[in-house]
Amino acid sequence: MLQFELLTQDPASHARRARLVLRHGVVQTPVFMPVGTYGTVKGVMPRSLHEMGAQIILGNTFHLWMRPGLDVLQGFGGLHGFENWHKPILTDSGGFQVWSLGEMRKISEEGVKFASPVNGDRLFLTPEVSMQIQTVLNSDIVMQFDECTPYETKGHVTTEREARASMELSLRWARRCQAEFARLQNPNALFGIVQGGMFEHLRQESLEALVAMDFPGYAVGGVSVGEPKEDMQRITAHTPHRLPAHKPRYLMGVGTPEDLVFGVQQGVDMFDCVMPTRNARNGHYFTRFGDLKIRNARHKADPRPIDETCTCHACAGSSGVPWAEGGREGFSRAYLHHLDRCGEMLGPMLATVHNLHYYLNLMAEMRAALDAGAFGEFVRRFHEDRARGV
């Protein structure tokens, strides 16, 4: 089940507002989806995700297949019941994780053979198996099994010929995914994934072939895989707005706050990235006024919060009143610096809450700006604020 309603479009860019209806709820776009690879967004209680405005989260087919296994997940009716999250879930197909195994895997027309990174068992992941796993997971959005085309391998930059072979394999796998998804009578929505490396004409061929298959939604894959930022932006500027206007568009694995704003300008509706959670665990905070690294000694005695305008629990405490408006219930940079230096688990937990709150609030601000017909002004202010520094 998927319904997509386009609400408004920015006249000066490809940015747009829409409403996405899935089996487990309504998602307002543009939206950022926190990553919960193993059935949890690391360090964050589901209640906190609700409170900070998360509408949809991710799970990963590959890792959940490894642990806890399909028999356990089936006993809970899928991933929603297992992790006690009752809003929408999107699951990655496992293609990216297989790609990241490098020499530990062998790709053929049929699928991918590899050794389990958990116990060494020999496994075979195919388009059909990916659809079967995701049907057990009962995710609202199922991703086709694809080959994630690398930018380079061992210093060798992927050639046009190699990118074409990879893209065409993903298209053949897309047809197999679609057939198996229909055979399983999965009531959720299957997205196709546009590949083609850093070559616009290959992206266009992939796009046109997938559109002809009439998927309910489409993703742009194979970006943010080690390529220079200029190439990532070039492909992001080329592909999303060429996808059907009446269907959702998802840019996979991207990215920084600037990447999100740029992506929305290009017509992207949905984003995911591990950056806000992974960086949090390394003392790297995203803020309205740039990025802050809490391990820097200059924060040792700083009484200010991470972001004086932020209403997250780390910055404003339970009052929700920002420091700049008289709120004093949050945690100081000095305290967060201390937690990080001592290796206390509360440090990365608070950092994760803050970073996700910032990302989700950034998307909410973009939605509000699009609703108000003021997206261009929002973009200008966003870049000014981020350049100001913390």
Image (cartoon, rainbow, N blue to C red):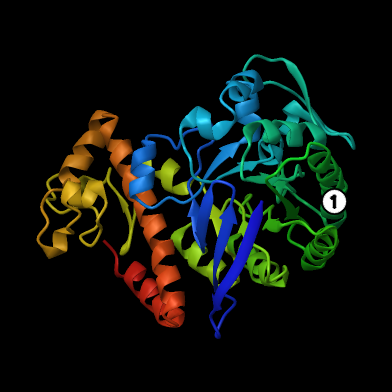
Q: Position of residue 128 (x, y in %)?
A: 81, 35
Answer whether residue 233 is visible to the viewer in this image: yes
> Which of the 4 image quarters holds residue 350?
top left
Quarter of the image with the C terminus is: bottom left
Q: Nearer the viewer, residue 255 or 208?
A: 208
Q: Position of residue 147 (x, y in %)?
A: 77, 44
Count neighbours of disc 1 (C-alpha within 10 A) and say few if under 14, some if 14 to 19, many if 20 or more.
many
Q: Is residue 95 left or right of residue 271?
A: right
Q: How many marks?
A: 1
**Residue at left offset 87%, top offset 52%:** 168
Q: Nearer the viewer, residue 151 or 17?
A: 17
> Which of the 4 image quarters holds residue 385?
bottom left
Q: Position of residue 253 (x, y in %)?
A: 58, 50
**Residue at left offset 9%, top offset 61%:** 326
Answer whether residue 281 is visible to the viewer in this image: no
Q: Label 1 is placed on what type of residue?
A: Leu
Q: Is residue 142 left or right of residue 360?
A: right
Q: Is residue 75 left or right of residue 370?
A: right
Q: Secondary structure at mark 1?
A: helix
Q: Nearer the viewer, residue 169 or 295?
A: 169
Q: Is residue 181 left or right of residue 90?
A: right
**Residue at left offset 27%, top offset 51%:** 312
Q: Position of residue 210 (x, y in %)?
A: 81, 58
Residue under label 1, please give it.
171
